[in-house]
Amino acid sequence: MPSPLYLELTVEDLIRAKAFYGAFGWEFVDYGPAYASIRYRGEELGGLAQGVPRPTGGPLVVLFS
């Protein structure tokens, strides 16, 4: 199964999100107070961005190439 090349997650609380995802072995590099890159096993996987909550109920779109 293919793995994601880059993953961007928008979270309400960056500190809590880093604590949660850190339990899975993810490491983070802070780029300011509202963004951190995600690293896993020495590779950059994506980023965490602090943002405002969105209403739920929209579609989920997954693209494979």
Image (spheres, helix red, strand yellow):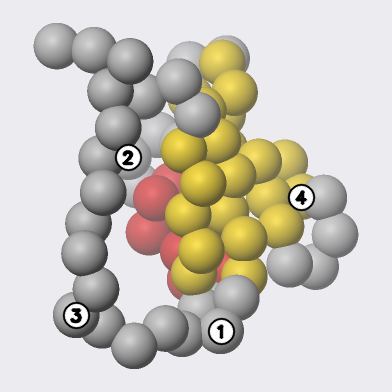
Q: Nearer the viewer, residue 15 or 35?
A: 35
Q: Which residue is mark 3?
A: 57
Q: Between marks 3 and 4, how big is the CA–CA gap?
A: 31 Å
Where 33 falls versus 13 (above or below)? Answer: above
Q: Nearer the viewer, residue 1 or 65?
A: 65
Checking the image for residue 30, the label placed there is 4
Where 24 falls versus 45 (above or below)? Answer: below
Crowding at dot 4, Cα within 10 Å, few <14 / some 14-19 / many 20+, comes out as few
Q: Between marks 1 and 4, how big is the CA–CA gap?
A: 19 Å
**Residue 28 locus on image (x, y percent):** 63, 42
Question: Upstream in the sequence, badge 3 or badge 2?
Answer: 2
Count of marks, rendered view: 4
**Residue 62 locus on image (x, y percent):** 25, 40
Q: Between marks 3 and 2, how big is the CA–CA gap?
A: 27 Å
Quadrant of the image occupied by residue 60: bottom left
Q: Which residue is mark 2?
A: 24
Checking the image for residue 52, the label placed there is 1
Q: Between marks 2 and 4, how big is the CA–CA gap?
A: 18 Å
Question: Upstream in the sequence, badge 2 or badge 4?
Answer: 2
Residue 27 appears in the figure: no
Which amino acid type is marked by label 4? Asp
Mark 1 or 3, which is nearer the eye?
A: 3
Say which element carries label 4.
Answer: strand
Say which element carries label 1.
Answer: loop
**Residue 3 locus on image (x, y percent):** 29, 18
Question: Upstream in the sequence, badge 1 or badge 3?
Answer: 1
Which amino acid type is marked by label 1? Val
Task: Residue at 82%, 50% (x, y): give it.
Answer: 31
Q: Between marks 2 and 1, how big is the CA–CA gap?
A: 24 Å
